[in-house]
Image (tube, helix red, strand yellow):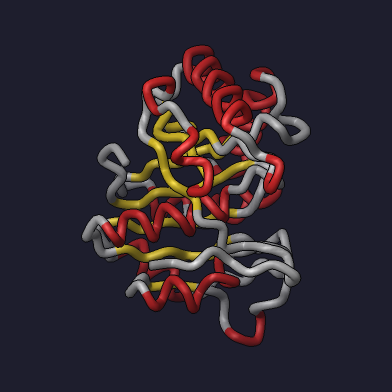
């Protein structure tokens, strides 16, 4: 991923897949040799949070910061003191998985002062197959709401076009064209797009003029198994 180092905040709407992106980006950068830390600041949505993949991440020597044990299943605005330490002394890549929409982004506002003097990228994950982000105007509206709520500014876009098990190569191409148009209209860089690993061999990468992050799904319903991580 292009020069994604320092503190990277991942935001997006509900169902955008931002947490899956955060987890897979952490694994990708760790395999590339970077020291990686990831903080779970999704204090709004009780499902599919970074903490659910903690064991897998720790096996790859990725430091995972989550709320105190007694609050792991709570939907409360609990900020661990470890977050302050993570910001003061970030690793080569420090990922912050924030809550969805402007409601979840409000948690970031409590960190705005601490982050002000740091080099921070805030990336908006966009899935054009989800409500509210299925139009360019909807994506820009959501970005503006996140900017206001977080007291920070989105600095880049991540395309995560997927229909879960029904995703096809055409879904990926459509999603790429969508976020490329969004990038042009918003004047924000398209940092990368995601492609599920099972589809990589079917994708013509010449049609994607940006980096591609392979996704091995870790956040799955109880009746499914997470993808194996090498």
Residue 205: image location, x then y, percent = 39, 28
In this rendering, would 90 be left or right of 142? left
The front one of 25 and 68 is 25
**Residue depicted at 26% across the width and 40% down the height:** 3
The front one of 175 and 112 is 175
**The C terminus - image quarter:** bottom left
Residue 164: image location, x then y, percent = 68, 46
- Is residue 90 something one can see in this rendering? no
How many marks overall?
Answer: 0
Extreme right residue here? 131
**The N terminus - image quarter:** top left
Extreme left residue here? 33
In this rendering, would 26 be left or right of 48? left
Extreme front residue here? 202
**Residue depicted at 39% across the width and 51% down the height:** 115
Residue 74: image location, x then y, percent = 72, 75
The front one of 18 and 40 is 18
Q: Is residue 214 above or below residue 110?
A: above
Q: Is residue 203 above or below residue 57?
A: above
Extreme bottom residue here? 70
- Is residue 182 something one can see in this rendering? yes
In this rendering, would 181 be left or right of 36? right
Q: Quadrant of residue 206?
A: top left
Q: Is residue 51 above or below residue 195?
A: below
**Residue depicted at 54% across the width and 19% down the height:** 177
**Residue depicted at 71% across the width and 41% down the height:** 166
Residue 83: image location, x then y, percent = 44, 68
């Amino acid at each position: 991923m292009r020069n994604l180092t320092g503190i990277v905040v991942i935001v997006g709407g509900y169902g955008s897949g931002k947490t899956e992106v955060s987890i897979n980006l952490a694994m990708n950068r760790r395999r590339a040799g970077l020291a990686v830390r990831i903080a779970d600041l999704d204090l709004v949505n009780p499902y599919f949070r970074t903490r659910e993949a903690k064991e897998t991440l720790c096996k790859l020597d990725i430091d995972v910061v989550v709320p105190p044990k007694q609050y792991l299943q709570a939907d409360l605005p609990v900020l661990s003191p470890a977050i302050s330490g993570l910001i003061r002394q970030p690793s080569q890549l420090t990922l912050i998985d924030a809550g969805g929409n402007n409601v979840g982004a409000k948690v970031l506002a409590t960190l705005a002062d601490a982050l002000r003097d740091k080099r921070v990228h805030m990336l908006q994950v966009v899935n054009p197959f989800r409500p509210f982000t299925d139009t360019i105007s909807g994506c820009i509206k959501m970005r503006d709401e996140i900017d206001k709520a977080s007291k920070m500014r989105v600095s880049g876009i991540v395309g995560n076009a997927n229909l879960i098990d029904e995703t096809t190569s055409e879904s990926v191409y459509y999603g790429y064209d969508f976020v490329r148009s969004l990038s042009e209209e918003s004047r924000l860089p398209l940092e990368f797009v995601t492609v599920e690993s099972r589809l990589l061999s079917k994708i013509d990468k010449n049609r994607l003029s940006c980096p591609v992050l392979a996704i091995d799904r870790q956040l799955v319903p109880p009746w499914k198994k997470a993808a194996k991580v090498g």
